[in-house]
Amino acid sequence: MSDRERQLEETARDVRRLEDHEKRPAGLFGIMFYGGTVGLLFVTPIVAGAYLGRWIDTLIEGYSVRWTVSLIVLGIALGAYNAYRYIKERS
C-alpha cells in the first residue's frame, strides 16, 4: 500500500468517525457546557449594563438610577438576542 492510499484510507476513517460523533447525542458535560455558554451570553450584557449605568449615574448630581435601570433593560434585551441567535445557530 502506497503512502497516498494509506493517507486516503486514514482520512476516510477520520471522516466517518467525525460523522458518527455528530450523530450521537450530547453527553452530560456537553449539555452543561452548552447551558453555561447560553447563560454567559445572556448575563454578560446585563452585568455590563448595570456597571455602566451605575457609573453614569454617579456622574450626575443627586440620587438617580435612571441610567442603571435603562441599561439593565437594554442588557436583558441584548442578552436575550444573543442567546436566541446562539441557540438558533447551533440547532
Image: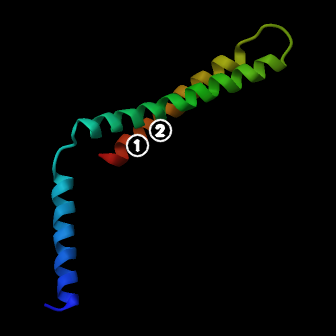
| Residue 2 spot, x, y in % from top left | 18, 92
Image position of 33 with respect to 52: above or below: below
Q: Is residue 18 left or right of residue 64?
A: left
Image position of 42 with respect to 5: above or below: above
Q: Residue at x 21, y 68 (%)?
A: 15
| Type of amino acid at the residue the image marks with label 2 | Asn
| Crowding near the residue tagged with mark 2, few <14, some 14–19, many ≥20 C-alpha atoms within 10 Å | some
Q: Is residue 44 left or right of residue 69?
A: left
Image position of 7 with respect to 24: above or below: below
Seen from this angle, which residue lies furthest top?
63
Image position of 81 with respect to 91: above or below: above
Q: In the rendered image, which residue does mark 2 sit on?
A: 82
| Residue 36 spot, x, y in % from top left | 39, 33
Q: Quadrant of residue 26?
A: top left
| Crowding near the residue tagged with mark 1, few <14, some 14–19, many ≥20 C-alpha atoms within 10 Å | some
Q: Calculate the distance from the C-alpha at mark 1 to the C-alpha at mark 2.
A: 6 Å
Q: Residue at x 31, y 34 (%)?
A: 32
Q: In the rendered image, which residue does mark 1 sit on?
A: 86
| Type of amino acid at the residue the image marks with label 1 | Tyr
Comparing 58 with 72, the one in front is 58
Q: Callout 2: helix, strand or loop?
A: helix
Q: Callout 1: helix, strand or loop?
A: helix
Q: Residue at x 16, y 71 (%)?
A: 13
Q: Quadrant of residue 60?
A: top right
Q: Which scheme is used to colour this image of the protein?
A: rainbow
| Residue 6 spot, x, y in % from top left | 18, 83
Task: Kindly indicate whether the residue at mark 2 contacts the one at mark 1 (C-beta within 8 angstroms).
Answer: yes
Q: Is residue 38 left or right of residue 78?
A: left
Comparing 32 with 38, the one in front is 32
